[in-house]
Amino acid sequence: MCGIVGYIGNNKAKEILINGLKCLEYRGYDSAGIATIENNKITVMKEKGRVSNLESLDGIDKLSGTVGIAHTRWATHGKPSKENAHPHKVGNITLVHNGIIDNFMELKSTLMSEGYTFKSDTDTEVAAAYIDSLYKENNDMIKSLSICVNKFLGSYAFGIINELETDVLYALRKDSPLIIGVGENENFIASDVPSILKYTNKYIDIENDEIVKITKDEVTVYDKNCNII
Ligand code: GLU
């Protein structure tokens, strides 16, 4: 079991995300990573080993963005390494994932025939490429993620950001834990409540197959047919 934290608001995401990851360390993990958005560009930093290794990377203090996602990984596909650590960035899409996409090999060969190449051995990077390819066609994240809910077999919790929609954080889950923390002009995603309790004690459970669009002021939950719940 690994961990996910995400933040969108007016404060610097990096500190909140690293604090959140520290609260999730008890779940066990082999690597850690973070992605934040600065000047409409996503920066990914990740490292094998402890959250403290991530924290001591050169340049991490320059992450000043107020939107971001972070992850502690428990390797299932590909050895523990920097390349296999999350977040994974493919095209416009950057994401963190908890769980296993059982049919990733089938998706990977289709995506490779479309020209996608892969830097890691993970099922997660395939999910990022799949969402990127869908979004390129339809320019609609909710529609793209609803296709994923219908297509992905296995279990997952995802936190997702898109370089073309820099004021939104997306989440979805099936059979893997993820909650939305609701604050004042800021919102969170997390694998468990304690990792965001320092910031808010209000939270929303996401049910299986639900897709969530989160801005700093609003949380909108969709079913797998793109209807608002
Ligand atoms: N299956 C993914 C991987 O191996 C996610 C593992 C996890 O839940 O940390 O990278």
Image (cartoon, rainbow, N blue to C red):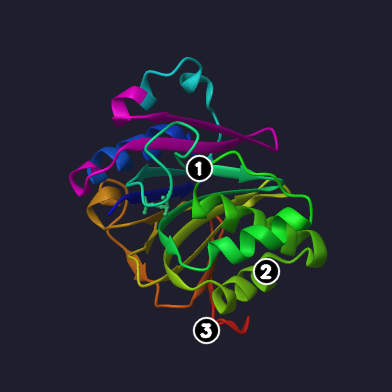
Disc 2 versus disc 3: nearer the observer: 2
Are the residues flagged by discs 2 and 3 in contact, CB closer than 8 Å? no
Q: Is residue 16 left or right of residue 195?
A: right
The residue lying at 51 percent from left, 53 percent from top is 124
Distance between the alpha carbons at the discs numbered 1 and 2? 19 Å
**171 or 112: which is nearer to us?**
112
The extreme right residue here reads 137
> Residue 41: percent from the left, percent from the top?
68, 35
Query: Any magenta on residue 26?
Result: yes
Q: Let me know if residue 45 appears in the view.
A: yes
Q: As displayed, is residue 10 above or below residue 4? A: above
> Residue 168: percent from the left, percent from the top?
61, 54
> Residue 34: percent from the left, percent from the top?
46, 37
Q: Name the residue under label 1.
A: 87
Query: Any magenta on residue 14?
Result: no
Circle 3: is it few (<14), some (14-19), or many (20+) Cα within 10 Å?
A: few
Q: As displayed, is residue 116 above or below residue 224? A: above
**152 or 188: which is nearer to us?**
152
Residue 229 - label: 3
Circle 2: is it few (<14), some (14-19), or many (20+) Cα within 10 Å?
A: many
Q: How many marks?
A: 3
Whichever of labels 1 and 3 marks the residue nearer the N terminus, that label is 1
Looking at the rendered structure, the kind of residue marked 3 is Ile
Element carrying mark 3: loop
The extreme left residue here reads 26
The magenta-colored residue range is 25-53
Distance between the alpha carbons at the discs numbered 1 and 3? 28 Å
Q: Does the residue labelled 1 lie within 8 Å of ligand 1?
A: no
Q: In which quarter of the image is the N terminus?
A: bottom left
> Residue 5: percent from the left, percent from the top?
39, 49
